[in-house]
Image (cartoon, helix red, strand yellow):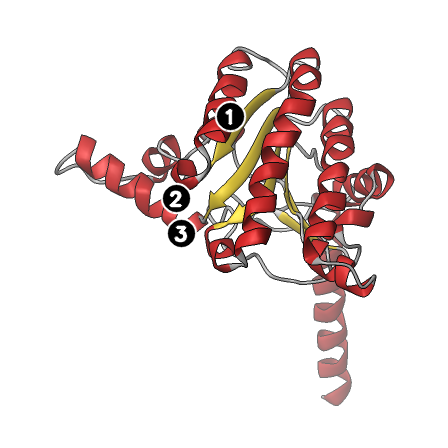
């Protein structure tokens, strides 16, 4: 059994869910935004260390203007509505990504929530907004080089300059909506993460399914590049001895 501390979710399928119901894509985002609160609450209740949600990628800027504008409004609405719950649940909130192009009032609200929760000791809740993992890695490397000229960079150095290093590596990455891609999301942090792709589109993703996924994945054996468990090693050794004995027996018979 493995302990799941940091879960990252690609919240996918809003637009397709809406189109299947002959509604505009925007309607799917509105319905999907209502799911976020229940998943955050479940993550907090389960005692997770960190939950990172992929809300808006750098590639999403190419979407229709009205859809992008709606996503901005939903982020602001979520913060206004959930600020008190975030505080009462001792959640440490942060938005990662290049958010400079967001409306000024939204940036101000983000900064206010981040400041008011900076000393929280509960769940690390992160929204990846206008985020791209390649850009994050490049920025981390360049920042290190500027601060440490002529010094060889290490893995530990790169991690220090990520947007949210305190969240640590991802243990489980979930993608809703049926697609099976990483989509430039936390590429470094998911190096040894378990991956789970569910056909459930985000507007229909429930706390119940979330908890079932956590329970199922926690039963997986995570080897981090090492060999299997001791029991598996013993089985392999016993099998090897049996094969060797059979080989010797056959050789003697042939003689």
Residue identified by numbered label 3: 134
Q: Residues within 10 Å of mark 2 (few under 14, many from 20)?
A: many
Residue 8, compared with residue 240, is above or below; it is: above
Q: Can residue 129 be seen? A: yes
Residue identified by numbered label 2: 136
Q: Residues within 10 Å of mark 3 (few under 14, many from 20)?
A: some
Q: Tell me what residue is drawn at x 69 percent, y 24 percent.
A: 81
Q: In the image, 149: left or right of 70?
A: left
Q: Which sits earlier in the primary sequence, circle 2 or circle 1?
A: 1
Quadrant in the rendering for residue 149: top left
State how far apart marks 2 and 1 are (Cα): 19 Å
Q: In the image, 23: left or right of 90?
A: right
State how far apart marks 1 and 3 are (Cα): 23 Å
In x, y percent, where is residue 62?
48, 59
In x, y percent, where is residue 109?
52, 23
Residue 66, compared with residue 148, is above or below; it is: below
Instruction: Tell whether label 2 touches label 3 (CB within 8 Å).
Output: yes
Residue identified by numbered label 1: 110
């Amino acid at each position: 059994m493995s302990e799941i501390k940091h879960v990252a979710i690609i919240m996918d399928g809003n637009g397709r869910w809406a189109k299947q119901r002959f509604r505009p894509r925007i309607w799917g985002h509105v319905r999907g935004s209502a799911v976020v609160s229940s998943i955050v609450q479940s993550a907090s209740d389960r005692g997770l260390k960190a939950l990172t949600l992929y809300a808006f990628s750098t590639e999403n800027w190419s979407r229709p203007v009205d859809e992008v504008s709606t996503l901005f409004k939903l982020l602001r609405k979520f913060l206004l509505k959930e600020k008190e719950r975030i505080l009462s649940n001792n959640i440490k909130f942060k938005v990662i990504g290049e958010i400079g192009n967001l409306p000024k009032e939204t940036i101000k609200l983000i900064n206010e929530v981040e400041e008011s929760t900076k000393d929280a000791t509960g769940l690390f809740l992160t929204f990846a907004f206008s985020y791209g993992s390649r850009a994050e890695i490049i920025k981390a490397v360049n920042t290190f080089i500027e601060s440490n000229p002529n010094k060889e960079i290490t893995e530990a150095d790169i991690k220090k300059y990520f947007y949210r290093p305190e969240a640590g590596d991802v243990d489980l990455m979930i993608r809703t909506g049926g697609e099976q891609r990483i989509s430039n999301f936390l590429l470094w942090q998911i190096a040894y993460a378990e991956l789970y792709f569910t056909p459930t589109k985000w507007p229909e993703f429930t706390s119940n399914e979330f908890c079932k996924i956590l329970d199922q994945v926690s039963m997986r054996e995570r080897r981090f590049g090492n060999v299997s468990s001791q029991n598996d090693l013993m089985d392999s050794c016993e099998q090897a001895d049996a094969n060797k004995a059979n080989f010797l027996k056959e050789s003697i018979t042939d003689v």
